[in-house]
Amino acid sequence: MELRHLRYFAAVAEELHFGRAAARLNIAAPTLSHQIGALETMLGTKLFTRRTKSAIALTNAGKRFLVEAQETLRQAAHAELVGRQAGRGDAGSLSIGYVLSASCGGLVSSKVSLFRARHPDTSFQIALMQTFVQFKALIAGSLDIGFTRAPTQFPSELTGFIIDRQPFYLALPEGHHLAAYRQVTVEMLVDEPFVAASLEMEVGFLSNIAAITPPGVTLRIVKRAPDVFTVLTLVAVGAGITVVSGSLACIAIPGLTFREIVGVKRTSDHVVAYRKNESAAVVLAFVKFIRGKIGAR
């Protein structure tokens, strides 16, 4: 049995007339009659009975079969539509990783929500991951897109483009002497104790602290922590100060305040990362969409 048999049967069942059904299907009436006869042979039952020379009616078996045939045809049409959408990148599934600073800056929410509005049949799985973890997941194929810190160099399997540049901010306790200034310079930070991210978080890109360190100077790191919230909590209790990208300056922790660091040549950059050999249409559509929206550099 083929889909054409179901289409022929549904047309005859809806018209209850072979001539009208044949015209609707754009085939000859004898051909249609032959195909319906073949379908009845396959099913081992009659689907129609004749009332008059031209009028026909569905048998009980025909009525039951019509329900299933119409549902199958609807599902087949839906499958064809989904296939075409997936081929264009209009449907599918995207697995997205992000670093906290990309989320706090609105990069993830704004870009994904805009894409979802234009591609409502695309589903998303979104997870918080450090940059190095995202790179490994992208290479392994368990992640499709990464919103990450800009690396000094992408792994050979990956590529990407900058979507955001942010200034650096100093995070410090509210009672710290530098809190009296609206802005601070890197020279004011030379003798201060710093709380830094763990070395594992810095693999593949320059840390915030290294990015603002003047040439020939080594800033004093007194503690390291495994995540941004722990770093900022240590700062809030007075363990030291730290450097974050501008988007993280919106985080509210009692006892913590932020000041912009001026006179820094570098910025805190975020990228969209993906596989160089990516072939999935929905991933490529997302990349193209983001490029068009941000004028990627």
Image (cartoon, grey):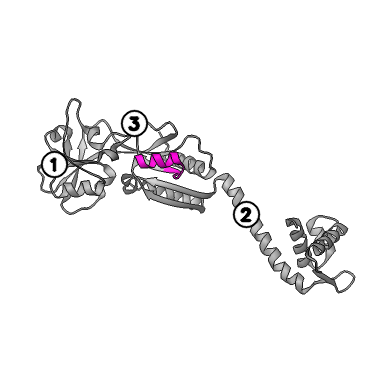
Q: Amino acid at mark 3?
A: Thr
- Residue 113 vs residue 237: left or right? right
Determine the CA span between mark 2 and mark 1.
Answer: 62 Å
161, above or below 113, in the image:
above
Of label 2 and label 3, which has the lower sequence position? 2
Picture quadrant where residue 262 is located: top left
User: Residue placed at 46% from the left, 52% from the top?
Assistant: 124
Report helix, strand or loop for mark 2: helix
Foreground: disc 3 or disc 1: 3
Query: Do callouts 2 and 1 mark residues in contact (Cβ within 8 Å)?
Result: no
User: Residue placed at 88% from the left, 59% from the top?
Assistant: 30
Q: Is residue 80 magenta?
A: no
- Residue 197 vs residue 297: left or right? left
Q: Amino acid at mark 1?
A: Tyr
Relative to the observer, which residue lies in front, 6 or 262?
6
Residue highlighted by disc 3:
152
Foreground: disc 2 or disc 1: 2
Q: Which residues are magenta?
A: 132-145
Label drawn at residue 79: 2
Q: Amino acid at mark 2?
A: Ala
Residue highlighted by disc 1:
181
Report helix, strand or loop for mark 3: loop
Mark 3, residues whose alpha carbon is within 10 Å: few (<14), some, or many (≥20)? few
Relative to the observer, which residue lies in front, 65 or 43?
43
